[in-house]
Image: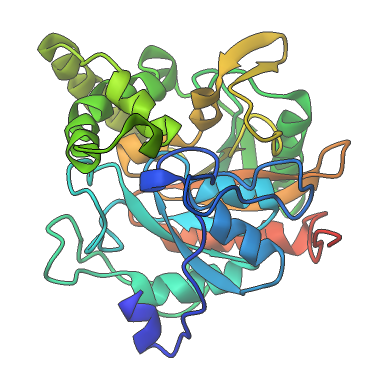
């Protein structure tokens, strides 16, 4: 935030979050629930749901959120705005609590346009001398300029490895791939074997509980049970991973990184879903998706691989559900190649059926 203010940004508000910025809905015991501007009976997501709702409703053109597994891209998809989780370390995490899972955690911009995402990232990126994870990769200093030495090579997929996906969402991913193909870009459907061998959500859960649970325990020490919101209670109730499980999860995370490295030796970007379903009703804990019953953590199935591997991704609205809710695609890029995915996102934005669409408030 200090960098945005130094660049002339005006801070408007701190928007609503779940307790500890930790869940896929933005609800807490202090300020209550945030609603989705497209349909007040539905969630704007979490953890950055207050931010996504404010931007979608026209209250602000730009915002910042944190993304541990879904929290910048998911809310953007549920409210029809754009967002980006940059390569891990591109944006310093200085001041973010807690430090423990910082290798999965990211800060990212949220906005109503890809151009504004690029502008924000150009100001946010680069080491600050305080966060040891922050990197000195080249900053995106010239907006959406993208200089390709050869034609782009892009693929698309909706699974396996991400969990079940609603047919409407899969159709939007396919439509985005077809739109790029119609521009003369080489696009093909692929699979990534590493995602099938090692499920990123399982890896994340086994590592994350070991790292995050002590922080939750310390933060809630001395509180009465009725003063602790449900997700903190859930985290504290989870069994610890064994050391063998933890070590295997660490090895699986490295295999997943290697699998993506192999993929990106042949392609410049991957088009996939952000979420498996459009914005859902408040308080739902289980979903039936294409006949499969899954718990709410599976909404992170296509987003958490980027947190485990550190890859950059842009969320961009590209269609609507039968109920008129926004559906987004995710453009995934190589490590430190934000310029490419922002360029591809700008191409899709120009032809998106959602271009200029806003919720009817």
User: Looking at the image, which is closer to me, 140 or 106?
Assistant: 106
Q: Is residue 64 above or below residue 200?
A: below
Measured as percent of width and height from the top left, residue 222 is found at 20, 38
User: Looking at the image, which is closer to me, 310 or 51?
Assistant: 51
Which quadrant of the figure has residue 53?
Answer: bottom right
Quadrant where the image shows the N terminus: bottom left
Which residue is pictured at 11% across the width and 14% down the height? Answer: 243
Q: Is residue 359 visible?
A: yes
Quadrant where the image shows the C terminus: bottom right
Q: Which residue lies furthest to the bottom in this view?
A: 8
Q: In this view, does 308 lie above or below 121?
A: above
Measured as percent of width and height from the top left, residue 281 is found at 71, 34
User: Looking at the image, which is closer to me, 139 or 275?
Assistant: 275
Q: Can residue 265 be seen in this view?
A: no
Q: In this view, does 254 lie above or below 22?
A: above
Measured as percent of width and height from the top left, residue 282 is found at 66, 35
Rendered image coloring scheme: rainbow
Which residue is pictured at 46% across the width and 73% down the height? Answer: 120
Q: In this view, does 118 lie above or below 231?
A: below
Q: Is residue 345 toward the left or the right of residue 181 in the image?
A: left
Q: Is residue 217 toward the left or the right of residue 171 in the image?
A: left
Which residue is pictured at 72% across the width and 33% down the height? Answer: 169
Q: Is residue 147 toward the left or the right of residue 56 in the image?
A: left
């Amino acid at each position: 935030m200090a960098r945005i203010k130094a660049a002339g940004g005006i801070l408007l508000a701190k928007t609503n979050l779940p307790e500890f910025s930790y869940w896929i809905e933005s609800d807490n015991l202090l300020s209550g629930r945030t609603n989705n501007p497209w349909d007040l009976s539905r969630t704007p997501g979490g953890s950055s749901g207050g931010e996504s709702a404010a931007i979608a409703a026209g209250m602000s053109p730009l915002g910042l959120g944190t993304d541990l597994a879904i929290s910048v891209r998911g809310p953007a998809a549920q409210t029809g705005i754009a967002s980006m989780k940059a390569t891990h370390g591109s944006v310093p995490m200085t001041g973010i609590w807690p430090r423990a899972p910082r290798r999965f955690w990211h800060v990212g911009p949220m906005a109503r346009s890809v151009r504004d995402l690029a502008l924000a990232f150009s100001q946010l990126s680069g080491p600050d001398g305080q966060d040891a994870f922050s990197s000195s990769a080249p900053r995106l200093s010239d907006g959406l300029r993208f200089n390709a030495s050869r034609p782009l090579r892009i693929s698309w997929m909706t699974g396996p490895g991400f969990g079940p996906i609603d047919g409407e969402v899969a159709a939007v991913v396919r439509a985005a791939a077809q739109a790029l193909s119609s521009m003369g870009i080489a696009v093909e459907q692929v699979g990534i074997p590493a995602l099938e061998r090692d499920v990123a959500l399982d890896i994340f859960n086994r590592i994350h509980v070991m790292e995050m649970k002590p922080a939750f325990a310390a933060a809630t020490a001395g509180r009465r049970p009725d003063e602790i919101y449900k997700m903190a209670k859930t985290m504290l109730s989870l069994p610890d991973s064994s050391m063998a499980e933890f070590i295997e999860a660490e090895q699986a995370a490295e295999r997943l990184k290697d699998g993506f490295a192999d993929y990106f030796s042949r392609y410049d970007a991957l088009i996939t879903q952000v979420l498996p379903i459009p914005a859902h009703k408040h308080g739902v804990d289980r979903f039936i998706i294409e006949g499969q019953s899954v718990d709410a953590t599976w909404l992170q199935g296509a987003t958490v691989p980027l947190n485990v591997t550190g890859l950059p991704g842009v969320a961009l609205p590209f269609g609507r559900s039968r109920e008129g809710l926004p559906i987004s695609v995710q453009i995934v890029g190589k490590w430190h190649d934000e310029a490419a995915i922002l360029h591809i996102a700008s191409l899709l934005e120009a032809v998106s059926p959602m271009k200029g669409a806003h919720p009817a408030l």
